[in-house]
Amino acid sequence: MTDQKPSATDGARITLRLTPAQKELLRRAADVAGIPVSAFVLQSAAQAAEQLLEDPSPAALVKGVEHLPTFTQPARQRWESIPATIRQRLLSNVWCGKCRHETTITNFTGTLKGGNLLLLGKCAECQGDVARVIESS
Ligand SMILES: [Zn+2]
């Protein structure tokens, strides 16, 4: 462990621990791009960071197991006012008319309809359309 040198002050200096295979891969990619490996690594990292920060999709905001729900703003507020444990139960006991039993709703969207929260999505088992209405209390 000899590479514990203090960072240079002229910009951040990052020591990367690469496997030989990773090093070779980066070197070849940098060759193709026609830039030094360090510039290539920095550029790629910056690009990835930009994409992550610019992407407004809820993927970056996923909480727990509720993947990618597309909600209108009022629907989201209503949904988030429900305790997480209850939300989980609401999502996992949705009746599927095709399966003829309770199932989990996936890929759902949320809207407010007449004061009630309406979730529209797909059955986790048969991918058929399922819906759940959550009445306002
Ligand atoms: Zn089903």
Image: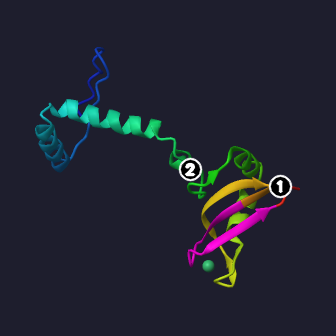
Q: Is the magenta stretch mostly helix, strand or loop?
A: strand
For the record, the magenta segment spans: 119-134
The residue that disc 2 covers is 62
Q: Is residue 121 magenta?
A: yes
Q: Nearer the viewer, residue 48 or 25?
A: 48
Distance of label 1 from label 2 (alpha carbons): 27 Å
Q: Is mark 1 on a helix, strand or loop?
A: loop
Q: Is mark 2 on a helix, strand or loop?
A: loop
Q: As shown in the figure, which amino acid type bears the numbered disc 1?
A: Gly
Q: In this view, does 126 lie to the left or right of 72?
A: left
On screen, residue 124 above or below 60: below
Q: Which of 38 and 62 is in front in this view?
A: 62
Question: Where is residue 26 drawn, in percent x and y?
Answer: 18, 42
Regarding residue 89, the answer to whether it shows in the image is no
Question: Where is residue 78 drawn, in percent x and y?
Answer: 76, 49
Q: Is residue 18 left or right of residue 129?
A: left
